[in-house]
Amino acid sequence: MKKNKLFAATLAALAVAAFAAGCATPLDVNKIMQEPAGTRYYTAYNIWYDGSRAISSINQQSGTLIPFGTPINVIKATKWTLKFKDLTTGKEHVIVYREKYGMEPMDGFLKKFLTTKNAAEIHKGIPPRVVDAMKRGIVLKGMTRKQVAITYGPPTPHRTPSWDNETWIYWKNRWDTKRVIFKNGKVIEILEQ
């Protein structure tokens, strides 16, 4: 009986260690993005951080803004985290990815967050007044879904299951949300709670 308990405890400890090691295994970002080694990556959308904790993948809109098109160096990506360096400020950041909110593996998040386009390429063809608001993290009435996704980031699927929804839900902080309402593909209202 004692041997069985010891064997079960050892087996459980090995399973936990194997699981933890698997979660910390680095992901090959270039392979995921289908890009060659040495590719320069940029942020595909604005993201906020407050400096006191890791950045949440649901992109709470409080603190300091890292603008879309910011050149970054991916330091390490795992199943649950993305560590990168902002090449304009030299600061390192960690995004904690929660699959239950993103409703897809980290690979999908990386494909949305990273781009090979710089800011000028991202906002090409968008009127200067709209680009200025986007760079400041402000959604304006009349913006398209794509412009909102660059400004606030893609909506998280657990609250906005489809980009076709007429309402996209975002977090201002850990407690308060805002809703972006669309009609015919353009913003008609921004409701803050």
Image (cartoon, rainbow, N blue to C red):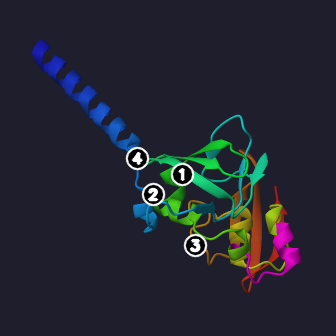
Measured from the top left, where is residue 29 in percent x and y?
A: 45, 57
Q: Residue pushed farthest top?
A: 2
Above-or-below relation of 165 to 29: below
Comes first in the chain, label 3 or label 1: 1
Query: Which region is colored magenta?
Result: 122-133
Read off the residue under disc 2.
29
Q: Which marked residue is nearer to the observer: mark 3 or mark 1? A: 1
Read off the residue under disc 1.
74
Comes first in the chain, label 1 or label 2: 2
Comes first in the chain, label 4 or label 1: 4
Mark 3 and mark 2: Cα distance apart in space: 26 Å
Read off the residue under disc 4.
26
Measured from the top left, where is residue 108 in percent x and y?
A: 48, 63
Q: Residue pushed farthest bottom?
A: 184
Q: Report the front residue among 46 and 159.
A: 46
Circles 1 and 2: CB distance less than 8 Å?
Answer: yes
Measured from the top left, where is residue 28 in percent x and y?
A: 40, 55
Point 83% across, 64% down: residue:
138
Read off the residue under disc 3.
162
- Residue type at mark 3 is Ser
Q: Quadrant of the C terminus?
A: bottom right
Above-or-below relation of 75 to 68: above
- Residue type at mark 4 is Pro
Q: Is 73 in the magenta?
A: no
Name the secondary structure under disc 4: loop
Q: Residue pushed farthest right?
A: 129
